[in-house]
């Protein structure tokens, strides 16, 4: 059974930074692409970033390019999302996903971590 546990969220002022972590178990982490998504109140869950199994390929949503960086540590079964230059519109619950490919997510979600950016 796949388990994903996100952490690192919190309250930050606009322009600040946060680093999210997602610890994975119950899967062969080193062979799986991983992704980050977010869901703001009243909105659908949306793609943020993804990384392939060996970190050689990544992709980002246009609204986070040059501000967010996804990375992973296969020795720790953990994927990270470094978020810089945060904006109030980045406020959302952030979820990680154990993807099938860089472009194809699954129904394996964590519980999410809340990120709130104040203006």
Image (tube, grey):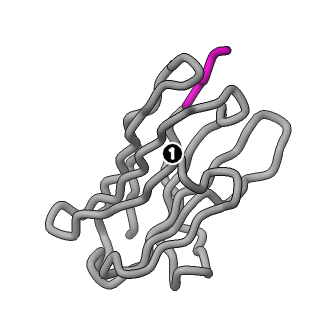
Location of residue 111 in the rendering, given as x and y in whole percent from the top left corner: 51, 45
Location of residue 114 in the rendering, given as x and y in whole percent from the top left corner: 55, 31
Above or below, 80 against 73 in this view is: above
Above or below, 80 against 104 in this view is: above
Q: Nearer the viewer, residue 67 or 117?
A: 67
Location of residue 89 in the rendering, given as x and y in whole percent from the top left corner: 72, 33
Q: Is 80 contained in the magenta span?
A: no
Task: Report the number of discs.
Answer: 1
Residue that appears at 61% across and 81% down: 104
Above or below, 47 against 111 in this view is: below
Residue that appears at 35% across and 47% down: 21
Quarter of the image with the C terminus is top right
Q: Nearer the viewer, residue 18 or 28?
A: 18
Q: Residue furthest front?
A: 66
Residue that appears at 63% across and 16% down: 118
Read off the magenta span: 115-119
Q: Is 118 contained in the magenta span?
A: yes
Element carrying mark 1: loop
For this view, does 9 lie left or right of residue 72?
Answer: right
Quarter of the image with the N terminus is bottom left
Q: Nearer the viewer, residue 8 or 26?
A: 8
Give the residue number, with chain letter if any, for mark 1.
111
Q: Residues within 10 Å of mark 1 (few under 14, many from 20)?
A: some
Quarter occupied by residue 56: bottom left
Q: Main secondary structure of the magenta part?
A: strand
Above or below, 32 against 96 in this view is: below
Location of residue 24 in the rendering, given as x and y in whole percent from the top left corner: 32, 61
Q: Residue furthest right?
A: 42
């Amino acid at each position: 059974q796949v388990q994903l546990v996100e952490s690192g969220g919190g309250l930050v002022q606009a322009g600040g930074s946060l680093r999210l972590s997602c610890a994975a178990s119950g899967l062969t982490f080193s062979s799986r692409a991983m992704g980050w998504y977010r869901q703001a109140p009243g909105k659908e869950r949306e793609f943020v970033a993804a990384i392939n199994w060996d970190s050689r390929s990544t992709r980002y949503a246009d609204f986070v390019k040059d501000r967010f960086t996804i990375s992973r540590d296969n020795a720790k079964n953990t994927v990270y999302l470094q978020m810089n230059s945060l904006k109030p519109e980045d406020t959302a619950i952030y979820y990680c996903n154990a993807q099938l490919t860089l472009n194809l997510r699954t129904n394996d979600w964590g519980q999410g971590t809340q990120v709130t950016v104040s203006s």
